[in-house]
Image (cartoon, rainbow, N blue to C red):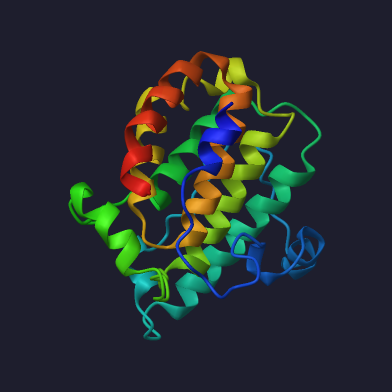
Amino acid sequence: MIKQILGRLPRKPSKSADNREFGGSSASSLNASISSRKSDLASDRPINSNTIPFSDFDDASPKHLKEKDIKRQTLLELVDYVSSASGKFNETIIQEAIKMVTVNLFRSLSPQPRENKVVEAFDMEDEEPLMDPAWSHLQIVYEFFLRFVASPETDAKLAKRYIDQSFVLKLLDLFDSEDPREREYLKTILHRIYGKFMVHRPFIRKGINYILPFHF
């Protein structure tokens, strides 16, 4: 049911062949691009990928270029780790993972009034969608979170302490993003959460029924 509901959320026009494809390559290409330097990410130490402010990622200038690259490599290693883990994630890892996702994804989008979205959908039919300049950073965080939620090593009973209704509500708020690539990731992730966290199913259905009319 949730898949059909999420599928009704519209996609704004895009000339891209596949907006969800990670970095324009397959998962194997992603793993091949990760630095040979490996960190001991399986330890209980905090996962810290917020070394520079998020706002710097939508800045095309060379500001903090070295720091951006370090953060990107750290995020790629986290994606690699969560994809190849062979043991249940403990509570510390789950807590730090959700904290990292929260810090990097949840931000103010300054959306237009919802009542204007229906009319705007027709006006933008032949226009190119707005692409977030920080997408190269956001995409890796979304990919990490998607694989984290889908991983058999993520215990739903433990993770629901951190992926709670407040967290899900913030995810729903991100549908105000003008970038279709972000909305596609959100639909896939919500579908995964719906399938894994049965306790959140009524809340997700209610939330989607609220936002659905404003995204046609």
Q: Is residue 94 above or below residue 69?
A: above
Residue 120 vertical position relative to residue 128 in the rendered view, above or below: above
- Which quadrant holds the N terminus? top right
Q: Residue at x 66, y 43 (%)?
A: 147
**Whole-percent x and y of residue 125?**
40, 69
**Image coords of residue 53 (percent x, y):** 34, 62
Looking at the rendering, which quadrant does residue 159 occupy?
A: top right
**Residue 114 as seen in the image, left or right of residue 157:** left
Q: Residue at x 33, y 40 (%)?
A: 213
Provide residue 32's location: percent of width, then percent of height: 80, 67
Q: Nearer the viewer, residue 20 or 104?
A: 20
The answer to whether 48 appears left or right of 64 in the picture is right
Q: How many marks?
A: 0
Reply above or below: 195 against 24: above
Q: Decide if residue 68 is in sight here.
A: yes
Relative placement, left or right, of 8 versus 215 is: right
Vertical placement of residue 150 versus 25, above or below: above
Q: Position of residue 163 (x, y in %)?
A: 47, 27
Indicate left or right for 166 with 27 as reference. Answer: left
Identify the residue at horizontal 20%, vertical 54% (top origin).
116
Is residue 93 in view? no
